[in-house]
Amino acid sequence: MGICGCLTSKLAGCILYLVSSIFMTIGVAIAALGCVLHFGGNAVYQAFSSLLGSIGSTNIGGEIVQLGILDLQRILGSWSSIISYAGLILLGLGLFFLAVGILGCIGACCNLKTVLIVYAILTLTITVVLIGFVIGYYVLKQNMRDLGAEEMRKLIVNEYQGRTHPSPNDFSKILDIVQGQLDCCGVTNYTEFYSAGQWNRTYYYSDSVGYIQLTAPIACCKLRKSDFEPQFANCTLSPTAQNSNIHTACYDKLWEFLDTYANVLIVGIAITAGVTAGISVLAIIMLCYHFKNDVTPI
């Protein structure tokens, strides 16, 4: 029984050392990701340029407008600050994981009872926190979505100027790219633009008709991807479901883009929670043996 317990403890110690080493590596990786998210917006764009390629670069009126990750965050309103804070959290979490991994290696190699106790408590705490984070994300997911949509509406109301403006601001250009490339209009539909205080609705339609007042932005028409001009000339005069995207929500598509990768992150966190739970069990096995036999130094 004693030999069996000793072998079990030794095996647990070896596995604990191996897993703690992996834990340290993961900690460094998470900390690096946190630094990129918080400090390196341009680096994020470079890393995910292929993912943003479908909405990345567009010729509008002869001017190449490049859409980056920070612009996408701005379109999503509060997501800009959320991602920045998430970077800080990941940085702290990564450094914490690194420290815990070092403790695990020391505890496994040196059989220090106090270190193993601290390690077991920390890994159990991490497990609970990670599980709480996953649950919290799914509980608050709809609230975050609603908050982002409301922030995007405020940007449209306060900043959108449209293509017909003599010198449209960056937000107008970016939103027009998103609407044209994703074949959508507004947060939920074109009616959000009724409250856009800076939108220049005056548009020269033709010599016979002259100037008209736009019902929806030109970018809400079905556009040719080559030059971002309307496929159907009558769209600007009378937009319908056939010649435009006025009833297709942009925010749903943008949220789907982010949510896809957020779900990947959540799955990774859930797996990490399972790993930390397993590590805790290994540490507890070693502690049980050493407490029973009282052979471990303090």
Image (cartoon, rainbow, N blue to C red):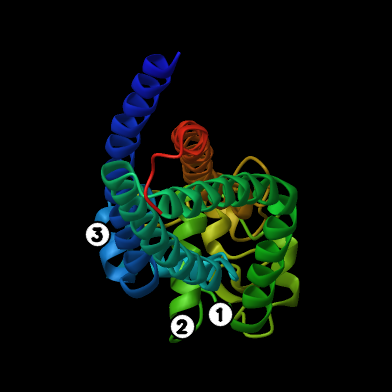
Residue with the most extreme front position: 294
Across and down, in percent, residue 16 comes to: 35, 36
Position of the C terminus by quadrant: bottom left
Position of the N terminus by quadrant: top left
3 or 2: mark nearer the eye: 3
Q: Secondary structure at mark 1?
A: loop
Position of 81 compared to 101: left or right? right
Q: Is residue 73 above or below residue 277?
A: below
Q: Which mark is residue 126?
A: none
Q: Is residue 74 above or below residue 226?
A: below
Question: Which residue is identified by label 1?
Answer: 161
**Badge 1: how crowded within 10 Å, few (<14), some, or many (20+)?**
many
Q: CB under 8 Å between callouts 2 and 1?
A: yes
Viewer-proximal residue, 212 or 55? 55
Amino acid at the residue labelled 1: Gln
Q: Which mark is residue 46?
A: 3
**Badge 2: how crowded within 10 Å, few (<14), some, or many (20+)?**
some
Mark toward the start of the polypeptide (3 vs 2): 3
Q: CA distance from mark 2 to mark 1?
A: 7 Å
Residue visible at 39% across and 71% down? 38
Position of 27 compared to 247: left or right? left
Position of 181 compared to 184: left or right? left
Question: Which residue is identified by label 2?
Answer: 169
Q: CB under 8 Å between callouts 3 and 2?
A: no
